[in-house]
Amino acid sequence: MAIDEKSLTKGQVRKLNALRKSIGDDLAEDAFSKWLARQVTEVPTVDPVAEQITGALAGFENDRKFNLGRYGYTVRRAKGKGQSGFVAVRNEKS
């Protein structure tokens, strides 16, 4: 059973090569394929705050005058005594 090494991550290739060195090619491929089948594939979690920001900006999707620029903006909570809300700062080229 040939394993396509191009579809593996860097860590998986290292594990496969370590198994090949320690127990041989044939046993290593069997052990690695069993190990890989048991691995849980992580589903990327959706950030709820990012979803809300996306929803808030959805109204500007087709607005040609709304421009976030090449480097975008950084949105943070306001800091300081008596400050509330958010601050948006334009990202500059560094």
Image (cartoon, rainbow, N blue to C red):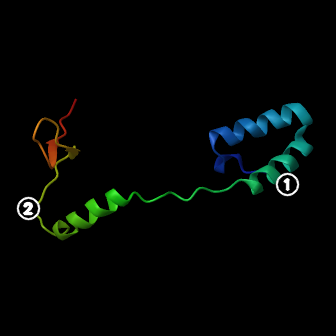
Q: Amino acid at mark 1?
A: Met
SS for callout 1:
loop
- From the viewer's perspective, tell me whether residue 6 is left or right of residue 46: right
Mark 2 or mark 1, earlier in chain: 1
**Residue 83 vertical position relative to residue 94 in the rendered view, above or below:** below
- The residue drawn where x is 76% and y is 55% is 38
**For mark 1, does the 10 Å Cα neighbourhood hold few (<14), some (14 to 19), or many (20 or more) residues?**
few
Q: Position of residue 22 (x, y in %)?
A: 88, 32
Q: Position of residue 93 (x, y in %)?
A: 20, 34
SS for callout 2:
loop
**Residue 21 vertical position relative to residue 82 in the rendered view, above or below:** above
Q: Quadrant of the N terminus?
A: bottom right
Total marks shown come to 2
Q: Nearer the viewer, residue 34 or 51?
A: 51
> How many angstroms separate mark 2 from mark 1 (CA)?
57 Å
Q: Are marks 2 and 1 in contact (CB under 8 Å)?
A: no
Q: Position of residue 62 (x, y in %)?
A: 17, 70
Q: Nearer the viewer, residue 68 or 26?
A: 68
- From the viewer's perspective, tell me whether residue 33 is left or right of residue 81: right
Instruction: Give the labeled residue for mark 2.
Output: 65
Q: Quadrant of the C terminus?
A: top left
Q: Nearer the viewer, residue 64 or 34?
A: 34
**For mark 2, does the 10 Å Cα neighbourhood hold few (<14), some (14 to 19), or many (20 or more) residues?**
few
- From the viewer's perspective, tell me whether residue 39 is left or right of residue 49: right
Instruction: Give the labeled residue for mark 1.
Output: 1
Q: Say the numbered circle drawn on residue 85.
A: none
Q: Amino acid at mark 2?
A: Lys
| Quadrant of the image occupied by residue 66 | bottom left
